[in-house]
Image (cartoon, rainbow, N blue to C red):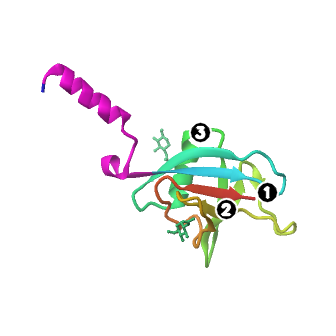
C-alpha cells in the first residue's frame, strides 16, 4: 500500500465503532436512577469481555472512575447482590433496594432474570440500577 492508502486505512480503523469482532469486548451503559427521589439519572459506559458478568463490568467501572461506587454482599442462595450504589444503601426496614432493569437496544425495558453475579450484559444495552 502507498503511504496515503495506509493512512486512510488507519483512519478508517480509528473511526469504526468498537464492536465484538475487533476486540472481543462488550460495551454497555450503566444508569443509576433513583425513582424514589426522582433525581437526575447518571449514566456511565463500561464493558465486559464477551460472555462476562455484570459484576465484572461494575468493578471495571468503579476502577476507572471516581464518580461511581458500589458495594455488594453475598447471599448463600442467590449469590452477590447490590448493597449500595454511590453511597446509597438498600434498607430492609424501609423496604428499599436496588432493582436491576435492562433497556434493550430495541427500547424494551425488562427486569433482569439474574443478579449482578450471573447477568451477562449484551452489547450496547443499558443496565439500569434503580433504587
Ligand atoms: C484497576 O485499574 C488498574 C490500572 O488501570 C489495573 O492495573 C487493575 O488491574 C484494575 N483492577 C481491576 C479490578 O480491574
Ligand atoms: C425487543 O426485543 C425483545 C427480546 O428480543 C422482545 O421480547 C421485545 O418484544 C422487543 N421489543 C420491541 C418493542 O420490539
The spot of residue 13 in percent (x, y) is: 31, 35
Q: Which residue is mark 2?
A: 82
Quadrant where the C terminus lies?
Answer: bottom right
Farthest right residue? 94
The image quarter containing residue 77 is bottom right
In what element is the residue under mark 3?
loop
Q: Which mark is residue 87?
A: none
Q: Which residues are magenta?
A: 2-26
**Disc 3 or 2, which lies upstream in sequence?**
3
Q: What whole-number distance in Å separates the C-alpha atoms at marks 2 and 1? A: 16 Å
Give the quarter the ligand 2 occupies. bottom right
- Judged by depth in the image, the label closer to the viewer, 2 or 1, is 1
Farthest left residue? 1
Residue at image x 68%, y 45%?
42
Q: Which residue is mark 1?
A: 35
83 on left or right of 64: right
- Judged by depth in the image, the label closer to the viewer, 1 or 3, is 1
104 on left or right of 101: left
The spot of residue 8 in percent (x, y) is: 26, 26
**Disc 1 or 3, which lies upstream in sequence?**
1
**Disc 2 or 1, which lies upstream in sequence?**
1
Give neighbour class at mark 3: few <14, some 14-19, many 20+ (Cα, 10 Å).
few
Q: Indicate yes or no whether the magenta region holds residue 72.
A: no
The spot of residue 81 in percent (x, y) is: 64, 66
Q: Which residue is mark 3?
A: 65
Residue at image x 75%, y 49%?
87
Farthest top residue? 3
84 on left or right of 92: left
Amino acid at each position: 500500500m502507498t503511504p496515503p492508502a495506509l493512512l486512510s486505512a488507519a483512519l478508517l480503523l480509528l473511526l469504526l465503532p468498537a464492536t465484538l469482532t475487533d476486540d472481543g469486548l462488550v460495551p454497555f451503559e450503566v444508569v443509576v436512577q433513583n425513582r424514589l427521589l426522582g433525581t437526575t439519572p447518571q449514566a456511565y459506559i463500561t464493558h465486559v469481555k464477551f460472555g462476562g458478568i455484570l459484576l465484572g463490568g461494575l468493578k471495571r467501572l468503579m476502577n476507572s472512575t471516581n464518580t461511581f461506587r458500589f458495594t455488594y454482599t453475598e447471599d448463600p442462595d442467590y449469590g452477590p447482590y447490590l448493597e449500595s450504589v454511590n453511597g446509597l444503601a438498600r434498607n430492609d426496614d424501609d423496604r428499599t433496594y436496588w432493582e436491576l432493569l435492562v433497556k434493550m437496544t430495541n427500547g424494551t425495558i425488562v427486569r433482569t432474570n439474574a443478579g449482578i453475579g450471573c447477568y451477562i450484559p449484551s452489547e450496547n444495552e443499558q443496565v439500569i440500577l434503580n433504587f
